[in-house]
Amino acid sequence: MSTAVKQELIFTGKTVELAVSEAAEKLGCEASELTYEVLEHEKGGFLGLGGTPAKIKVERTVAGEVIAREFIDTLLEDMEIKADVEVIATRKSDRQINIVGDEAGVLIGHHGDTLEALQYLTNLAANKREEDESRDYVHITVDVENYRSKREATLRSLARRMAAKVAKNGKSVMLEPMSPYERRIIHSEVQGIEGVSTNSIGVDASRRVVIYLESAGFSVPTRKSERSSRRSDRRSERRRDSGRSVQKNVKKPAAPMYDDGEKMSAEELSDLISTYGSKEKPAREPQKKFKDFDEYINSILGGSSSESGTEN
């Protein structure tokens, strides 16, 4: 079974009612949901001076915190990592678990990849419900050696530098893939910079932020490898086009000359040129028409149709 933990927080106000309202606002719930104890009632001073506010202790039941803590402790023990674990209550049912120790850095990973996985598993453990169990969801944030605040400062600096680059060059900049938490940091930082804006592209772990110039509109920049590939393709295409152009301009080689007999004399060659080199073509002899098939046969045999006859 999951274990519920009672959270105790102290709030003050000019009156008890105002202290309760302040507690409900900070915890993100209705005042009627709170269980509280009045530690001190408000006291009025002389002419409004020297008074003391009301003080209340709010009790709020949060499920899953102990499970999350036990999960982290077990993980550290199994990995033989010596570190201190601190649980801090934040808004409503949110909790932050801080892991501090010289050996804890291994839990961060490249750009916090391992830390994000650890946080995901911790939330699964903390919110695992038994059958027919109904309780509020608790969100656990896990941090190691104050990594998240350091990473946030790095990302905000990166966002400002890239935004200045976009404003100067007018070209969009695409950042490396980031988690939703890190993308929100980039978006929030660029939001306060005039003239530039952000958008996210990609899916799941490949999702990344694009910073672009608002006046130019959103556009996705191409990577260097893609630009290099495109340039290479264009160069290859130009070479092919150039080859085809050269091929068009190249004259076909003259047909080979053959000597099928004795060489002609100069006079015979002159007569041949004068006969076939003339622009005027010799008139074609009109085709002879035959009366019947017999006349056609006789013309081939050299006879005449009158010489042919049929036997009775």
Image (cartoon, rainbow, N blue to C red):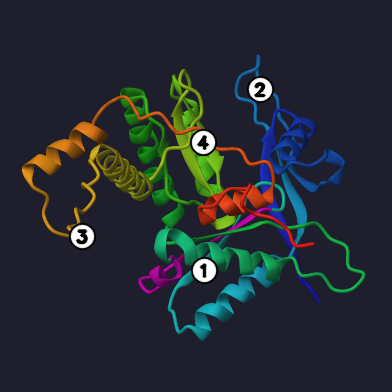
Residue type, numbered disc 3: Asp
Q: Nearer the viewer, mark 3 or mark 1?
A: 3
Residue under label 1: 85
Q: Nearer the viewer, mark 1 or mark 4?
A: 4
Q: Residue 163, can we see it?
A: yes
The reply to whether dot 3 and dot 4 touch (C-beta < 8 Å) is no
**Could you classify mark 3 by the number of other residues whose Cα lies within 10 Å: few (under 14), some (14-19), or many (20 or more)?**
few
**Could you classify mark 1 by the number of other residues whose Cα lies within 10 Å: few (under 14), some (14-19), or many (20 or more)?**
some
Determine whether, in the image, residue 130 is placed left or right of residue 107: right
**Residue at position x 38%, y 48% from top?**
226
Q: Secondary structure at mark 1?
A: strand
The reply to whether dot 3 and dot 1 touch (C-beta < 8 Å) is no
Residue under label 3: 260
Residue under label 4: 187
Residue under label 2: 45
Q: Nearer the viewer, mark 3 or mark 2?
A: 3
Per the model, the C-alpha gap separating discs 3 and 2 is 136 Å
Per the model, the C-alpha gap separating discs 3 and 1 is 106 Å
Residue type, numbered disc 4: His
Q: Secondary structure at mark 2?
A: loop
- From this view, report whether residue 164 is shown above or below residue 1: above
